[in-house]
Amino acid sequence: MKNPLLRIMRTGAVCALFILISCAAGRSAQAQRWLQNVQVVTPVNDGGPTGALLDTVTSVLRRQGEDATVRRAPDRPNTTFRELEKNLLGEGLDFTSANQLFVRYRLEADERGYAEQIKNLYFIYRPQRAGETDVPIFFLEMSDPEIREAVFGSGTRLHVNEAVFKPFREQITFPKLVNENGTSLVEVGDRIIRDSTAATSERKRLMNTIRKFSYY
């Protein structure tokens, strides 16, 4: 006759082993998933992707008319595109006055690869003289699927070969934009980055992580 105590001990050992394996698998799955929210600021250049993006965004919003709602800045209330346009003109500005663009990304990776999402766009006018305050032009959340597709499904054609079309979703990816001249990494998670050395270190860390999961 089998010893009941021995059977209980064996059952307990099996359960403990199962729990250990489950915990290890859980830790492994967590270790293989990476998530980071970041923000960069980059110049709006005429003839470049950011300048073309500004033109496309304003064109999309203008076509939507009164249905298009935007904000002057992240902490401002919603307003219509036309009302904002009128306010800007009253200040001697318009949408083409924007010369800097903040782009907020959600970066995510797991064993299936790397993916990113642009969460919002924030266009500002930055005066050339030091000490002057940035002037907000407009802020746009990219949560509306219709606006997101209208904007990022658009793009530009190569000057040397107009048969080649490059959508904005390929031109302003985080790995491409963060390595452009004039682009600065200004926020990682909840941390504001003001020091250029820290920004360079963070950029390298982020790019190394992305490369682990993709071909960038």
Image (cartoon, rainbow, N blue to C red):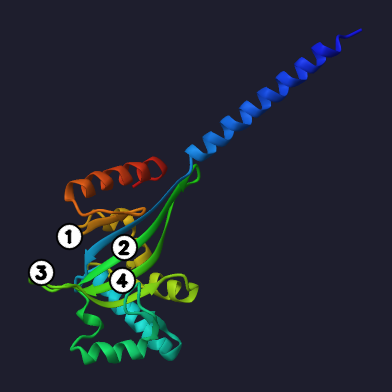
Which numbered disc, 1 or 2, marks the residue that appears first in the sequence?
A: 2
Q: CA distance from mark 3 to mark 1?
A: 19 Å
Give the labeled residue for mark 2: 171
Identity of the amino acid at label 2? Gln
Label at residue 122 = 4
Quadrant of the rendering where the N terminus is positioned: top right
Q: Earlier in the sequence, mark 2 or mark 4?
A: 4
Q: Say if 71 sits above or below 179 in the image.
A: below
Can the viewer see residue 158 in this picture? no
Give residue 177's position: percent from left, percent from top: 27, 58
Label annotation for residue 182: 1
Instruction: State the residue at coordinates (44%, 76%).
Output: 147
Secondary structure found at label 1:
loop
Q: Is residue 53 shown left or right of residue 16?
A: left
- 10 Å crowding of disc 4: few (<14), some (14-19), many (20+): many
| Left or right relative to 173: residue 109 | right
Give residue 131's mark: 3
The kind of secondary structure element at disc 3 is loop
Instruction: Please state which of residues 172 and 81 is positioned toward the viewer in this rendering.
Output: 81
